[in-house]
Structure formats: structure tokens, C-alpha cells
Image (spheres, rainbow, N blue to C red):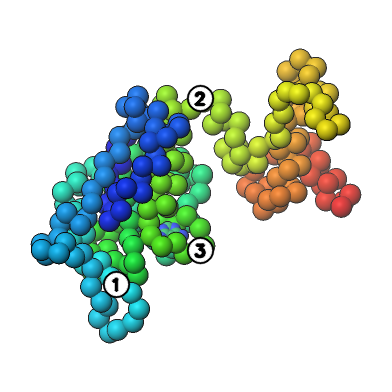
């Protein structure tokens, strides 16, 4: 899978060279191509932005610069995304859907934004990473790439994806490792029993309990057995 990133701050993406994503790039599961939109400025000072018509704070990125940068990377099968707080908030379902594309172009705004006409021309899907405002789309683009890359073949184990929070609509059960006794807190006995069925069941019920406690709204869409629903009902009543 290939990401083309249109940005005024390509240096910010160095963070992706580390750890799991860096390894995915080295192993060619993932390709990331950075385009500095400033290279498309026709101005001798490499200016890319200007003051807003109608007045107001900040600078707006010119539409012609974004359009030329976009045309230099787009193909017939590109999916185009504009990172903006006005977009739909990214969730695990969207992440999974995006992992099926061969080519995604990420448009990162900075300053007060991008001239509306180029957004109307390109018609990107607008995605936000949460209900707060950042200084630009670069960190959101990295969040999106990191979350999508985890689904690509060879990046992390299938097991990790199946076990993690959200993948089955619930939060993940708690995990433990050595030592068995830490400050008199002992690892739950069942996890040391070697009894796989019991462990699976314990983990499933812990997932339910934690989801109920921390994100009860997630239970509305989760697929639960009758017995599991009964368990949740008991948790509610024993509050
Ligand atoms: N740009 C600025 N804030 C953002 C956000 N929350 N999500 C996506 N892009 C942004």
C-alpha cells in the first residue's frame, strides 16, 4: 500500500521511520511518499499562502499550489483524504476500510486552512482524528497511517489484531507478565492454570466487564450471547 502525503512540513513525518511502521516500510509492506507543496510555488520566495479574502486571522494556503501538488501524485485509483477537524471522526471500522486501498493521498492543511475552491475541486473525504483542533493535518495523517498500517499483511500478527480493543466491538482484557507477585498484587490464578478454555472465558468476561465500566456505549453494538447479556445486567444491578 502506498501513501502520498501533501504537506508543507515533510520533516514531521520522520517519526514514521521508527518501530513497527519503520519496519513495515523497510519490508516494503508500506510505501510513504512525501510531497512538499512548497515545491509547487511559482513565487521566488516560495510563498504558498496569503491573507483571507474578507479579512480575519491567519493565512490560507493557495488553491493553485495544492491543486498542482495533488495532480503530481494522483492516479485513477487514488483515494483522497483531507485531514480536518470538520471531517467525520476516525474509528476502527474506517481504519479497516481504508486498509483495503492500494493508494491513499493525504492532504494536510496548516495555518488557518486551505482555500475552499480546491477542496470543492478535488472532493476529498474529510477525516478528523477527534473533536479538538491541532495546528495542522500532519499529526492526524500520522495517526491515520499508523492505524491503517497495522492491518497490512506482514506488519503485525493476525492474532494481535483479533485480540485488541475494538476489533470485536469490546475493549481488550487486562494483560500480565512476570513477576507473578508485584507489590503484593498477584497475577489472576486462572492465567497460570494452563487451561485454555477457562482462560478464554475469563478474558471474554473481563473484556465485557471493562467495556461496561469504561465505555458502556460500545456494548450497544457488540454481539453478545444470552449468558453474556445476563452478566452485564448483573453488573448494572450490583452498582
Ligand atoms: N487538523 C487540525 N485539527 C485536526 C483534527 N482534529 N483532525 C484532523 N485534522 C486536523
Give the mark nearer the N terminus: 1 vs 3. Answer: 1
Q: Tag 1, which secondary structure?
A: loop
> Residue 58: horizontal and vertical position, in percent?
33, 74
Structural crowding at the residue carrying mark 2, measured as other residues with C-alpha within 10 Å and reported as few (<14), some (14–19) or many (≥20): few
Depicted 218 relative to depicted 65: above or below: above
> What is the distance, in whole Å, between disc 1 and disc 2 at their CAs?
44 Å
Asked if the residue at label 2 sits under 8 Å from ligand 1, the reply is no
Residue at (19, 46) in percent of width and height: 73
Earlier sequence position, callout 1 versus callout 2: 1
Q: Residue furthest front?
A: 45
Mark 3 residue element: loop
Which residue in the structure is indicated by mark 3? 132
User: Could you tell me if residue 25 is visible in this image?
Assistant: yes
Q: CA distance from mark 1 to mark 3?
A: 20 Å
Mark-to-mark CA distance, 3 and 2: 32 Å
Q: Which residue is mark 1?
A: 59
Marks 2 and 3: in contact by CB < 8 Å? no
Camera-near label (3 vs 2) is 3
Marks 1 and 3: CB-CB under 8 Å? no
Answer yes or no: disc 3 within 8 Å of ligand 1.
yes
Q: Residue at x 21, y 64 (%)?
A: 48
Mark 3 vs 2, N-terminal side: 3
The answer to whether one can see residue 198 in this image is no
Q: What is the number of the mark on residue 157?
A: 2
Amino acid at each position: 500500500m502506498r501513501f502520498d502525503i501533501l504537506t508543507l512540513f515533510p520533516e514531521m513525518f520522520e517519526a514514521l521511520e521508527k518501530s513497527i511502521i519503520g519496519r513495515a516500510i523497510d519490508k516494503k509492506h508500506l510505501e510513504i511518499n512525501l510531497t512538499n507543496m512548497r515545491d509547487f510555488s511559482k513565487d521566488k520566495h516560495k510563498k504558498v499562502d496569503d491573507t483571507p479574502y474578507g479579512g480575519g486571522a491567519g493565512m490560507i494556503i493557495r488553491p493553485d499550489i495544492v491543486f498542482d501538488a495533488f495532480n503530481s501524485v494522483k492516479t485513477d485509483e487514488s483515494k483522497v483524504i483531507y485531514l480536518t477537524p470538520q471531517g467525520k471522526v476516525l474509528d476502527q471500522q474506517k481504519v479497516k476500510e481504508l486498509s483495503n486501498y492500494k493508494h491513499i493521498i493525504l492532504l494536510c492543511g496548516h495555518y488557518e486552512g486551505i482555500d475552499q475552491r480546491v477542496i470543492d475541486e478535488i472532493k476529498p473525504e474529510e477525516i478528523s482524528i477527534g473533536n479538538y483542533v491541532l495546528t495542522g493535518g500532519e499529526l492526524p495523517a500520522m495517526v491515520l497511517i499508523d492505524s491503517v498500517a497495522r492491518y497490512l499483511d506482514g506488519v503485525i500478527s493476525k492474532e494481535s489484531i483479533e485480540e485488541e480493543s475494538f476489533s470485536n466491538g469490546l475493549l481488550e482484557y487486562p494483560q500480565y507478565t512476570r513477576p507473578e507477585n508485584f507489590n503484593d498484587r498477584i497475577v489472576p490464578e486462572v492465567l497460570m492454570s494452563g487451561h485454555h478454555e477457562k482462560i478464554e472465558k475469563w478474558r471474554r468476561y473481563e473484556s465485557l466487564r471493562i467495556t461496561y465500566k469504561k465505555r458502556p456505549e460500545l456494548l450497544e453494538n457488540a454481539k453478545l450471547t444470552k449468558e453474556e447479556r445476563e452478566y452485564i445486567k448483573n453488573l448494572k444491578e450490583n452498582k
